Each structure stands twice: as C-alpha cells, then as structure tokens.
Amino acid sequence: MRIKLLYNTDVEALKKVLDMKGVPFDPEAMMDHVVYMFEIEDCSRVTTHQLVRHRVASYDQESQRFSAATKEGVVTPPSIQTNEAASRAYEEALQTVYSAYEKMVTAGVPKEDARYILPTAIKTKLVMTINARSLMHIVWQRTALQAQWEIRELATSLRDLAREATPELWTKIMER
Amino acid sequence: MKVSLVWSSPKPEMTIAVAMRRCYSTKVIEDIEAELEKKGPEYWKFLLAKCLQDKSLDVLEHYTMSLLVEGANEVEVSRLVRRFPYIHATHLKETDWLFSVNARTLVELWKDSEGKSFAESVVAELDRKKVSPLFNELAFGDVIHAH
C-alpha cells in the first residue's frame, strides 16, 4: 500500500486571519477548515469498502468498469500468506476466478459485467479529500486494536502524514 | 457582506482533472499528474466541461477553499449553513466568520436562490485573485449558468 498527501490547507494562512481579527488559534475550532487530499494506492477493495463508510469525505476511485483486472493485483492477508494450506486454496481460487474473468472478456462480455466475479482482495487506487475532524474520527476508529490489519495500516499512515503536515492540529491526539 | 479568499487548493483545475482521471486510469498518481501537465490547461478545461455537463460534480469536491466573511449576521449565516450543510462556518468576532467550502457546494449555491448572492461574492473574489479562471468561466459563465 502506498499513500501520498497531495495537498493540505495552509494552517499559517488561517492563523494570519485569526491574528488579524485578534482571535486566538484554537486547533479544535480549525478542524473543519483544514483539509487534506490523499492518493491511496494498492489497498484492497475490502479496505476501501470500510473506508467509504466514513461519509464526510470525498472519494474518487479507480473504476473496474473500464480497467482490466489482473491476478497479480490482489492483496493477500498475512494470515493466509503464513498458512501453507490456506495459501494454496487462495491461489487456486484466484486462478479459477481470473481464468473465468478472462474467458468472459474474451467472449465479449463488457469488463463492467465480467467484474462481478472478481474478489474484493483486488488492489485499487483512489483519491480522498477530507477535513481534519473527519480524519481524526477515522484515526480513532480505525487504529483501534479491534480494527482489521489493513485499514489499521491505512489509518496509521494517514495520521502520520497529516500530523507531519499540520502538527498544530494533531498534538491533542492521544496515541493509541 | 465582504468575502476575502484566505486559501484555496493549489492548481484547482488540475486537482479536479486528477480526480477525474483517477477514476479511469490504472496509472500511479505521479504518471497521471505528468500526463495532465503535458496535455495542459486546454485538456483540463475539456475534462471540467465534461464533468459539469454530465453533472458529475463529485470531482469538484476536491477543490476546497477557506474564506474570511465580514459583515454577515448570525441569521444570514445560520440560514446558509442549514441549507448547505457542507459549508463550515466558524464565528470569529462580531459579524466576522471563517468559512470553508468546496467547489461543488459553490456550484450548488450559485444555482440556489438563497445561495446565489453569497456564491456571486465568492466567484467575484476568485476572479479578482485570478484563482481557477477556467473553472469560473465554465461553471459560472453564460453556458453553464443558463443550463
């Protein structure tokens, strides 16, 4: 998985306005105004299904209607990777699914219909724009030990990038 | 009511184009950005016109801005934020506010009788600061305006 911060609101510009008006900088009050745009690459659709449940954000995701799927582009959970029998079953299932996908596309079925057979393990790419308040909610919810490993990894990276870019807003966040 | 731009997404039209291309490309983001830089503003304009005409306004949400709004009373602001929940407004002092809004909401404000006057002030400020000229022309010019 690869995550990149494409831009974020310039907190200094906000501070300048507050200074001009004689209003003290309050991170809590600025959380709705500081926005981040991220590129997220090569996480599974399992994880993006979990991510988009956080609705106060804007998402645009790579479409499977038009781009071809390949067997190499799947995420394999560590619990399967480290289990020989499970790993074999996973690989066999992928072979069967992708073989059927390719046969359907070759037979003239549009990609948008052939994709119905694809696994949710498939890797995807998306851009997400989100304000600090919503991002902090994701971080709280999805870095918890109860969260699944892949979205924990994603939420941790989002938090680290946001904290590096706008430390003023993230000092109040307690580490889990 | 006086509206001043505090900050906006860098290269707004390119940002919207990146979001559009993300949906239909398997490339990594650096390649999408390089492709868009190479094709230049005419291509961004083509993509923008397409998203506005198709009413695929979700991609506009990636273009965001913060505004200083002076001389607005609480009743006016409350009416606006109740009608447009994606406007974020923080009271600074007296009749001064900090607003954050995205370009999709700006288009929706423009089309709404109660939001139009505020949207016009924002677009005039964007024009004054020469921010997103292609977007302003396409979204708030005669063609889309009439639409």
Image (cartoon, coloured by chain):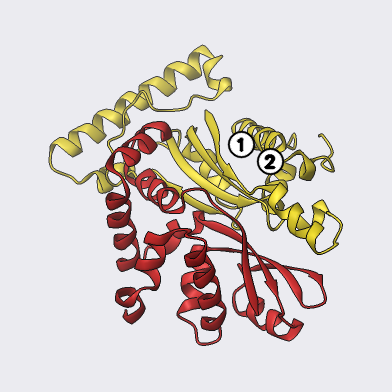
How far across and down, in percent of the image, does residue B54 sit?
31, 66
Residue that mark 2 sits on? A142
Residue A41's place in the image compared with B139, above or below, is above
Q: Quadrant of residue B85?
A: bottom right
Percent x, y for residue A143?
71, 37
Picture residue at 58% right of the left edge, 21% below the top: A79
The chain identifier of the residue carrying mark 1 reads A
Secondary structure found at label 2: helix
For the C terminus of chain A, the quadrant is top right
Q: What's the chain of the residue with tag 2?
A: A
In front of the other: B113 or A44: B113
- Give how far apart the Cα atoms at labels 2 and 1 are: 6 Å
Query: Is residue A28 in sight in this rendering?
Result: yes
Q: In this view, does B141 lie above or below A73?
A: below
In contact (CB < 8 Å): disc 2 and disc 1:
yes
Q: The yellow chain is which one?
A: A
Q: Residue at x 85, y 62 (%)?
A: A22
Q: Measured from the top left, where is residue A164 in percent x and y? A: 70, 33
Colour in which the image shows chain B: red
Q: Quadrant of residue B30?
A: top left
Question: Are tags 2 and 1 found on a single chain?
Answer: yes
